[in-house]
Every structure is written in structure tokens, then in C-alpha cells.
Image (tube, rainbow, N blue to C red):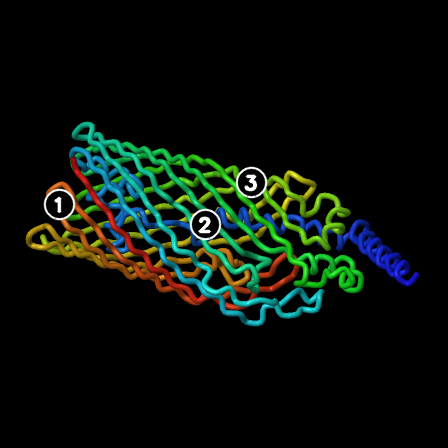
Amino acid sequence: MSRQFKMMQEQNDLNEMLRKISSGTARNRDCVLALIGFWLVFFPLFALGAGIAVMEQSVKELGHAFSGAPVNTEDASMVFFNPAAMSQVRGRMLSMAGYVIAPSSTFHDQASQLSPLVGGAPLAGHHGGDSAKIAFIPNVYYVHELTDRVAIGIGFNTPFGMKNGYASDWQGRYQALDSEIITLNFNPSVSYKITEKFSVGAGFNVQYLHTRLTNAIDFGTICVLQAGDGPCASRGLSPQAADGHFALKGDSVGFGYNVGALYSFNDNDTRLGVSYRSRVSHDIHGHGNFSVPAHAGLLIQRVSGQFIDTGARMSATLPDTVLFGFSHRINPRWMVSADALWTHWSLIRELRTDFSSAQRDDVLDLKWRDTWRYAAGISYFSDSGKWTIRTGFAFDQTPIPNAQHRSPRIPDASRYWLTVGLSYAVFKNVHLHAAYAHLFMSDAGIDHRGQTGDRLTGYYNEQINIGGLQMDWRF
């Protein structure tokens, strides 16, 4: 009899909890609806987020911090940086390069906690360790002279990309676990030499984007926010005691263009260059999969349209850029170069996700800002002409405005580049390039609040090492 009474009491508690969730106040309904889209919200955020632009398009240029990229006429990466320079190539040229990116990003906690509405207890779990992952980036470029004035080229590269991951039980698991974005870009181009000193060029871009994002779900906190601690605790649905899981994959193909101009003074001793790469719009289609703890299953089943596997769609735009640069040959031994890169991150004011299920649209406010990257470099040419040594320095701004808008998926910060490179002419028509860069980054403070009210507070200690090898073949 006692057991029967206990079962009836539990059923009454569950019914009362479901009644509160299904027919609660407007505030409760709004909270539930906001939570519905939470696990997909990072999909748009990091398909476009700060810190995913990839500068590594030429090992030769990496040697002096890409300071000579918009006026470079010595390797085929001009297809990407400034297609106008292709008209300077005689014959045909193939450039193939690979880079190893070895970042380090360690989170340091400063009293991260749950929502005050569920007691504000510290977020359980460890700090997540080093979240950054080693990545390999290849690119290939080819330039072909058609006439004395016209050249065509083609490039395959990765203009945007990122990858990181945390342990499944780290403190920020409700905001991020695994994050991966890959873009592959196909870039046919043409260049025309208007005069011996002035050239123009243009290219067309076909860009494929793939993303995979995962995070944990705190069903315990969701329950308590809606029904109170009593009925939830009796079901084992206390905060941080009933974690689920969400994974999302998405793909898109977008299109853009790039244009450039190059002007040479004094028999090429001094060059000025400018190029523009357009924004690329992506219509991303994805699918999300939820894993719900068994003891939260009945709760989710009774709340229609929530935390079920669903499709998702959103419109996203990767930003356009403008690159200015010059180089000056001081004498046969020395050359200096500098450039400035502007990126239009302020295009991204908000990101909106549309769901295929009954979930309402989710809107994320980013407030990103436009950024500048400044670089300067110097090159030394040996007497024999076989060796070239380069070094460079650059300052690269982050578009993230403050700690409140910094996410654990991309804890980006402003960085300082220090680079060194070496080129060697194996044969007259075959050159090898090697380069290394170390990126010093300021500590990146984070004070990011999740949709369940959890607050990840602390800072990231970060640095990046980059190494690359490249071969140029003229034939």
C-alpha cells in the first residue's frame, strides 16, 4: 500500500511539473522557447566567428609576415592575394605549400557558476585543458602566361577554418565541446597588363563550407527553472546531474570574387598594390541530433517540439577584405615591405537560425567590429642569388569587442606575429621556401553567459606556432 501511494505521489509530482512547463506563465514559456534553440545557436556563431580567417596562403610570404603579399610577383599565391600580379609571370608557374598550425589555448577559471535562479553553484568539472587542435593546411596555385599582357591562374586554398575541442566534463561543456569549421575555395583568375608598369586582375570564387559543433545540455537546470527543485530532484533532474548532448553538422556552397591592381616604379624597385576580396554568402543547411538522459525522456516527450532531432537553416556571410601594400628594393641586397589588411567583420551584427521543427527562430547578438592587420618585413638576398632570408612583424586585431561577447568555441584575442623565412633556388626554375611564425597573444578574458544562465568566467592563455614548406616550379 505504501509503495502504491509513493508511485501515485511521484506521478502527481510529474504531472504537476509538466503542467507548469506546458501552461506556465509567459515568462516560463519564453524561457523554454529560448532554450529550444540554444543548442543550435553556436552553429551560425562559429561559421562566421572571429579568429577563423586563414592568412597562410604562401610560405614565402609567411617569412616576412605577409607584408609583401599584395605586391608579390615571385610565387603563384598572387592568385589569392592580388591577381593583377599574374601578368608579371613569364611561362608557367606552379606553387604547392603545406602548413602545420600548432595553437595552444588554456582556460583558467575565475568562479564560473550556474544561474542564480538555480542557486548559483560553481560549475562542476575541470578546466578543459588545452582546447586547441593541431591542423594541417595545404594550398596549390597555378599561373599560365597566355600573351605578353594576359595571364590566367587558378587556386585551391582554405581562406577560413578553425578546430578545437574540450573534455566532455569540463566546466564550459554547456557552451562548447567540439568546434570545427572547414572552407575549401576554388579561385580561377585572369590578369591584364595595361602598360609595362600597371596591371589589373580579377577572379571568381566557389567556396564550400562544412561545420561540426557539439555541446552538453543541462536538463537538470532546465527542469528546475520550470518546475522547481522538489519535483525535479525526485526524478534525478538536479542541475548538472542530468546532462544530455547535442551535435550538429552543416554544409553550404557560396560564391564571390576578387579584384586587384599593381603599379611598379623605377624598373620594379618600388611597387604598390591593392586588392579586394568580396564577401561570400552561405545558405547553410544542417541537422542536429540530441541525446536525452533516460530519466528526462518522459519530460521531453510531453513537451512538444523540444530537444528532438531536427533540421536547421541559416544565412551567413563571410566578410570582405581590402589589402594595401608596397615593397621597395633599397639595393641589390635588401628589400623592405609593408601592408595593411582591413576586414569587414561589422557585417555580422546578429545571426539568426531557422529550425525545421516547432522551435522558434534564435537570434544571437554579436556586435563584432571591423579590424585592421598591419605588417612590415625585410628581405636579404645573397650575392649568388640562390639564398634569400626574410623576417617580419605584424599586429592583428581581434573583432571580439569584450569578454561578454567572447565564446569558448573561439576565444580569440589580438595577436603579434614574429616570423622568419628562408628561400633557396635549387635550380634556376625550382625554388624551395621554409618559414616559421610565433604568434604572441594577450590574455583573453571571458564572461560569457549561456541560455540556461550558466556563466563561464575566467581567461584564456594563448599562443600559436606555424611552420610551412613550399615549392615553386617554373616551366
Q: Which residue is mark 1?
A: 266
Quadrant of the snapshot with the C terminus: top left
The reply to whether callout 2 and callout 3 are in contact (CB within 8 Å) is no
Point out the tag, 2 or 3, that comes first from the N-terminus: 3
Query: As displayed, is residue 84 above or below residue 120?
Result: above
For the view shown, which residue lies furthest in the right direction?
1
Q: Which residue is mark 2?
A: 345
The kind of secondary structure element at disc 1 is loop
Point out the tag, 1 or 3, that comes first from the N-terminus: 1
Query: As displayed, is residue 171 above or below residue 22?
Result: below
State which quadrant residue 421 falls in. Answer: bottom left
Question: Mark 2 or 3, which is nearer the eye?
Answer: 3
Query: As displayed, is residue 347 above or below residue 377?
Result: above
For the view shown, which residue lies furthest in the left direction?
384
**Residue 64 screen position, x and y as percent:** 24, 55
Q: Which residue is mark 3?
A: 286
Q: CA distance from mark 2 to mark 1?
A: 37 Å
Density class for disc 3 (Cα within 10 Å; few <14, some 14-19, many ≥20) is: many
**Residue 286 screen position, x and y as percent:** 56, 40
Please tell me which residue is depicted at 52% across the width and 58% down the height of the picture: 407
Density class for disc 2 (Cα within 10 Å; few <14, some 14-19, many ≥20) is: many
Q: CA distance from mark 2 to mark 3?
A: 24 Å
Q: What amino acid is at disc 3?
A: Gly
**Exactly how many numbered labels are in the figure?**
3
Please tell me which residue is depicted at 45% across the width and 44% down the height of the picture: 318
